[in-house]
Amino acid sequence: MQRVVVPALLVVAAVMFMWAPYRIDAAPYESTMGLVQKIFYFHVPSAMTAMLSAFVCGFASVFYLWRRNPKADHVALAAAELVVVFGLIVLVTGPLWARKAWGVWWQWEARLTITLVMWMIFVAYLLLRRFGGPGSEVMAAAVGIFGMALVPFVYWSVNVWRTLHPTTDVARTLPPEMAGPFWWSVFAFLVFYAGLLLVRVRLERARAALDDAYVLLEE
Amino acid sequence: MSGWIRRAGSALVAAAMIGLPIVLSAQQPQSEFVPADTLPQEVLPATPLVFAAYAFVWLALVVYVFALWRRLGRVERELADVRAKLGPARS
């Protein structure tokens, strides 16, 4: 089943990504920011994917702590790695947009700071899994839940605190000629994310099977 | 005493005159994007920034997919080798 679903997801995502630049190019310039606002079409979908992945990691961690199910642990670890990948894209494309739109690369305001902290929490999760030794998955699960708890703060920070960052109303109020390419990119990122998550879980399952096989070999 | 009050009053008025424009001119967060027909006059060229952003996204995703595929291939090959050593009964 997965041998069909994963290639299908990745092919759909690849086609959507290849078509995305044409749709983004056809979208109108934003009146105050001009050309640089086009970064929005990949920056925000990356952020949405990273936040979704943080939720996947958090819920899988809760399930792991509750049932000690290794499959939940594999999902949590895979999702945490994808938070770091998509979060890195957000943290690199954001400053490139800000440099032109705000005149600075970075501002220590609520949205940017909390996003950076959330990303560092998931980096800590991966470091814990890599160097924490046996039993680190329990502590990492707690870290994953803590990382997930930051997602609502990241999302609502622009509405609650005074900040330069555009508010969450932007996506909802987009005119159709901007909304089309934006939701196209969002869907491309989500399809790609689903494919990557399945592959990454498969890697973790193979690693667990390899560990078991080595134990059997030594006995 | 009245001189002190007058000086304090003048200081307050001066502070308000300086502070009010700063408060009023503070940049408000954008709550909607409005399409424009023409590209406004650019001071800092946006093209390299947009190009760098999209190039980074594509590069990061391609590198990650490549690394993931290599890791998966390595682990699955090693698993197949160990299972072959174990034999069909124990694997």
Image (spheres, coloured by chain):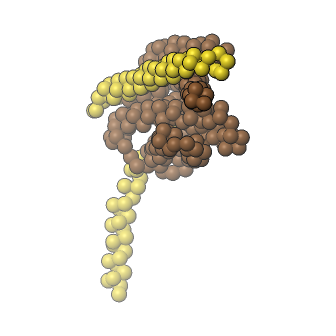
Chain colours: A brown, B yellow
Quadrant position of residue B37: top left
Quadrant position of residue A214: top right
In front: A85, or A190?
A: A85
Image coords of residue A47 (percent x, y): 51, 34
Q: Quick one: quadrant of the N terminus of chain A?
A: top right
x 54%, y 36%: residue: A80
Question: Is residue A26 at least partly visible in the picture?
Answer: no
x 37%, y 70%: residue: B12
Residue at the extreme right of the image, as rendered: A67
Indicate left or right for B23 with A148 as reference: left
Q: Quick one: quadrant of the C terminus of chain A?
A: top right
Quadrant position of residue A64: top right
Image coords of residue B19 (percent x, y): 37, 60
In front: A6, or B12?
A: A6
Residue at the extreme bottom of the image, as rendered: B1
Image coords of residue A121 (percent x, y): 50, 45
Residue A15 higher or lower than B74, as above or below: above
Indicate left or right for B89 with B82 as reference: right
Image coords of residue B80 (percent x, y): 56, 17
x 52%, y 29%: residue: A45
Residue B41 higher or lower than A149, as above or below: above
In front: B31, or A133?
A: A133
x 47%, y 49%: residue: A110
